[in-house]
Image (cartoon, rainbow, N blue to C red):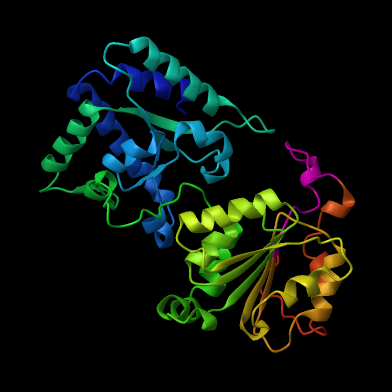
Amino acid sequence: MRTTTTDAFLRALAHSKSVETQTLLLDEMLRSLISETESLDDDDDEDRAWFLDLRPREKYQKHSLSRSVNIPFDEISGSFHLLPPRETPFSVFVEEGRDDDEESLVSSFENQRETFQRGDFKGVQWNIKYAFVYNEHFINAVNAKMLKMQKDSSLGNGVDTHDVLALNNEKKKNKRRLWEPSPSVKELYKTFLSSSETNNNKNNNNNNSSSIVLDLGSGVGRDSVYLASKGFDVLACDFDQKALTRTQEMARLHGVEDKVKVLKWDARNDDAFMCALSSVDDVSRLKLVLGVRFCHKPLFAQIVKHMPAESDCFFAWFHFAKGCEHSKVGRPNKEKDLIAPNEELRSIFTKNEGFEVLKDDV
């Protein structure tokens, strides 16, 4: 049974009064990780954060867990794109109230709880499974748990307690992420891009020799930043300047600002693809032309015509297929916004045009 946001916050408040009660909740959370991590992608485990720390930055910098991401609560409304997919469980840390003012703590809890209970257009809320008041009792509970587990660090199923509860190193920038790239992009990377090409990118200090990704309709940049973290240089193209600004901020946050460039770009222009291509530093290094949940069909003919022959390049497009208009969500529902599976892209990106279909499914 899924824990509701209300349950998580109320339990955090109830367990915040002593080391013993914080330990009980901490033990329960650690046990739940055993089952949750069965579905984790081992390739990305080092980058994964499990906790959202809502405390002010100065308190986070003073004491925090390395598997956490800090977004102060007063900044959360502009940072929802940094949170995990709605169905993915995670835990939150909240600021303690003053000892003499429990009313202020309850009021703060209510504000934070209500924020995370808001659903998107599909009515889906974030899956906050556990919440903790990050007070002296919690810190002592973490320290005691670390000492107790020194001899037996494994919780089972590959979950290392020391890793889960390790403290942040002030000298090492925390680049963990709660957000996830598109599952299709992760699969694309694992299947076609992660071999020697990416290893060369990561091991090569010369940025001018890294392979390049052209991300068309990049949105807030999760896929762009993910691929940059894997060693690629990325040109993120989108019409929304706010989204491009968030892409740059996310790239800085994860230490890949030198590998992500942005371009304000309009797919509706007759020369849209050439405009994007002309902004690529070296087309011979172009490895991937990517589109995710973005569709402007006239663009496909431009890509076929102008895809540089000198590059050994993949074309990958992940979008809604015809039939999804009959699903529960019911959108998109216009012909121009849907792709006919196993048919439409195959008829455009043909062998005669120099393309080989490696995968085409729904």
Asked if 239 appears above or below 311 in the picture, the reply is above
Q: What stretch is highlighted in magenta?
A: 317-333
Asked if 156 appears above or below 216 in the picture, the reply is above
In the depicted view, which residue is nearer to us: 349 or 93? 93
For image coordinates 24% across by 18% down, the residue present is 17
Residue 181 visible, this angle: no
Q: In which quarter of the image is residue 281?
A: bottom right
Q: Please state if 189 lies on the left or on the right of 300 as rendered.
A: left
In the depicted view, which residue is nearer to us: 349 or 49? 49
Q: Where is residue 28 in the image (x, y as percent from the top left)?
A: 29, 31
Asked if 11 appears above or below 321 in the picture, the reply is above
Q: Please state if 292 lies on the left or on the right of 83 as rendered.
A: right
Asked if 64 appears above or below 343 in the picture, the reply is above
Q: Quadrant of the C terminus?
A: bottom right
Residue lying farthest front? 58
For image coordinates 49% across by 31% down, the residue present is 74
Q: Is residue 205 magenta?
A: no
Q: Position of residue 358 (x, y in %)?
A: 66, 75
In the depicted view, which residue is nearer to us: 27 or 166? 166
Magenta portion: prevailing SS class? loop
Q: Please state if 33 lies on the left or on the right of 125 as rendered.
A: left
Q: Where is residue 170 in the image (x, y as percent from the top left)?
A: 27, 52
Residue lying farthest bottom? 310
Q: Is residue 325 magenta?
A: yes
For image coordinates 29% across by 53% down, the residue present is 158
Residue 110 visible, this angle: yes
